[in-house]
Image (cartoon, grey):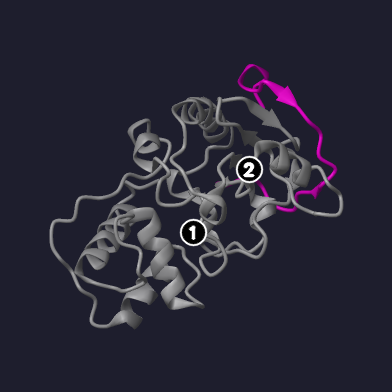
Amino acid sequence: MTPWLVHRTVESPNHDERELPVTMVVLHYTGMQTAHDALDRMCDPAAKVSAHYMIDTDGTVTSLVPEDRRAWHAGKSYWRGITDINSASVGIELVNPGHEWGYVPFTDDQMIGLMPLLADIIERYDIPRANVVGHSDIAPARKDDPGELFEWERLAQLNLALAIPKPRIALFYDNPASFHLALERFGYDITDGRAAVRAFQRRWRPDRIDGVVDGLCGALLFELLLERDMGRAR
């Protein structure tokens, strides 16, 4: 952690030892009515949940768990062969009531607080942009956060996340099963295929989140895989 990027420290007891090197950042929303409620929960030993950082709507960055410790933010999850996401990631919670309590856009102050923190983490751990993911990416059947209103493109403009590709063709895989296999190749857990497609849409096509594979979904995934295979999507 770079101290000047953090405004305060509130120690959570909910952490343990890492078993993997840090190769990912997972972004969440708190999904609770207030920041105070979220902070209380992440500091409650009975809740068994935490994150390394929380960013309030006014941009205040709170450190909860030291980065060298395993915070408990991902739950049962998967990304590109990794199942112990907690051990392999830094978790960042952004204060937002989420879909249950009245989902709203993230504030400009939050994004301004997030971007230098994320840039610092990426640089220190040499994290690929493809491994800056949302909770819904790693747990598609369980989670929707940080959701379709999160400003991924704003991060992409600073090279802090992958940009939404510009499809050159409307490619439709032979059937949904072939799309699911390609989705798995990109990194998603496809145990629940429809949920995986919804998670893909939430991240890469947020104007349509219905779990239905079509030509644009196929074209977006094709471009993402092509960029990765050509070494341009690190």
Q: Along the line of sight, which residue is nearer the eye, 19 or 157?
A: 157
Question: Is 83 left, or right, of 207 in this rendering?
Answer: right
Q: Is residue 102 above or below residue 193?
A: above
Q: Residues within 10 Å of mark 2 (few under 14, many from 20)?
A: many
Disc 2: which residue: 90
What residue is rendered at 48% in x and 29% in y? 115
Residue 197 occupies which quadrant of the picture? Answer: bottom left
Q: What amino acid type should be assigned to the residue bearing mark 2?
A: Val
Residue 226 place in picture, x, y as percent: 27, 58
Q: Residues within 10 Å of mark 1 (few under 14, many from 20)?
A: many
Under tag 1, what secondary structure? helix
Instruction: Determine the CA span between mark 2 and mark 1.
Output: 15 Å
Q: Is residue 111 above or below residue 97?
A: above
What residue is rendered at 74% in x and 35% in y? 64
Residue located farthest toward the top when viewing the structure as drawn: 4
Q: Along the line of sight, which residue is nearer the eye, 130 or 59?
A: 59
Q: Along the line of sight, which residue is nearer the eye, 167 or 142?
A: 142
Sequence-first tag of 2 and 1? 2
What residue is rendered at 20% in x and 73% in y? 172
Under tag 2, what secondary structure? strand
Q: Is residue 172 above or below residue 126?
A: below
Question: Is 73 left, or right, of 174 in this rendering?
Answer: right
Q: Quadrant of the N terminus?
A: top right
Q: Which mark is residue 165?
A: none
Q: What amino acid type should be assigned to the residue bearing mark 1?
A: Asp
Disc 1: which residue: 137
- Magenta part of the protein: which range? 1-25
Residue 221 place in picture, x, y as percent: 30, 62
Residue 19 place in picture, x, y as percent: 74, 53
